[in-house]
Amino acid sequence: MSGLKRPLGLAVAQLGPIHLADTRAAVVKRLIALLREAHSRGARLVVFPELALTTFFPRYWMEDDEAIARFFELSMPGPETQPLFDLARELGIGFYLGYAELTGDGRRFNTSVLVDEAGGIVGRYRKIHLPGHADHKPQAPFQHLEKKYFEVGNEGFSVWPTMDTKIGMCICNDRRWPEAFRVMGLQSAEIVALGYNTPSHNIHWNEPTHLRMFHHLLSLQANAYQNALWIAAAAKCGAEDGFHMFGGSAIVAPTGEIVAQAQGEDDEVIFVNADLALGDSFRQNVFNFIKHRRPEHYRLIVDRVGAGEPLAAGELAKLASTFQQEG
Ligand code: ING
């Protein structure tokens, strides 16, 4: 018997580029091959990227609703994704899948679903931190129009009890915001699954390229450690019709250590037999929320959106004194 107390086979299935000309059927074939490999490695859960069925279309300015709609799924599973769900049920493996969601009443979200080992959808997350812009920037080498094509997610950061653990989800830019992980940590998440599509080049300012990967890994490692989480992060990467996005898919332990990382920028499975018990000592001794957190002093985190003026002396103490702690 291995020394692992509560092992769970955790895989990340990184996707190489998806080009405009690639069909969903061709992409689903790649997802199926990755699912099979993850299963052969012993995975119980495999994480696919954000917007895993199409190219990263927010890089393009489109005004025609028809042209935009072709990147969205009307149902999940749909006819083209059903084979992935069927295989997952046959193999008894759960997965996270990111895609563009068009709801019945015409609303558009950047969405992920959590599917259990019986092939059933147990959870859905709609991306909350939408980066980029909504206006056309013709001077930029490419656009980043998530604020144009998607609404802010309206279902919060949930955590779902499944596969003998508790799993949360987020998407891409969310990994840069500690609030997202603390909300999931406060719901006792042990694993957070996330997919991402991150351009290697910053269109907003001349950011040194090496910082892109550094900030990606820093975000994963900090949020994993500070919430005693296993984080499984799946990239879609490589040059999509010439537009490069970086890889760096990784599995990070509650220690904050990177325990597996992708080697290239194409389709690739990374796997860890994760001991979920690894988070217990951090939850008990370091990030023991109930023992050490003092939310009465965190009011500005919820009350303010942007940075404002320093509060006058005594103002923070007054805010703290009016704090009503939930049960
Ligand atoms: N992509 C990028 C991300 O957050 C970005 C956008 C990159 C924002 C770097 C800020 C800094 O990884 C998506 N799809 O969110």
Image (tube, rainbow, N blue to C red):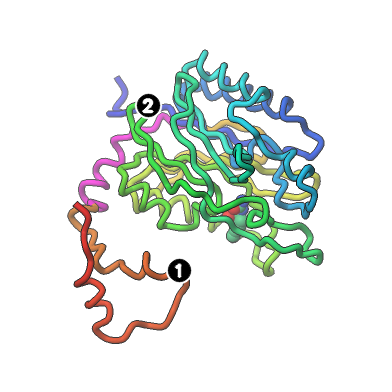
Which quadrant contains ligand 1? Answer: bottom right
Q: Residue furthest front?
A: 105
Q: At label 1, which amino acid type do we have?
A: Val
- Say which quarter of the image contains residue 44: top left
Horizontal relation, residue 184 to residue 65: left or right: left
Magenta span has 233? Answer: no
Q: Earlier in the sequence, mark 1 or mark 2?
A: 2
Mark 1 falls on what kind of element?
A: loop
- Say which quarter of the image contains residue 253: top left
Residue at 48%, 28% in the rendered image: 121
Vertical placement of residue 316 versus 218, above or below? below
Vertical placement of residue 82 versus 207, above or below? above
Q: At label 2, which amino acid type do we have?
A: Met
Report which residue position mark 1 lands on: 305
Q: Quadrant of the N terminus?
A: top left
Would you say the residues marked 1 and 2 are in contact, meaning their CB atoms lie under 8 Å apart? no
Q: Nearer the viewer, residue 64 or 125?
A: 64
Mark 2, other Cα within 10 Å: few <14 / some 14–19 / many ≥20 = some
Magenta span has 286? Answer: yes
Report which residue position mark 2 lands on: 163
Q: Position of residue 41 (x, y in %)?
A: 50, 22
Give the residues drawn in magenta, as a range. 271-288
Residue at 59%, 45% in the rendered image: 110
Mark pair 1, 2: CA separation: 36 Å
Q: Position of residue 151 (x, y in %)?
A: 59, 52
- Residue 212 makes an appearance in the image: no
Q: Residue furthest bottom?
A: 312
Horizontal relation, residue 176 to residue 65: left or right: left
Q: Position of residue 293 (x, y in %)?
A: 24, 59
Q: Nearer the viewer, residue 133 or 9?
A: 133
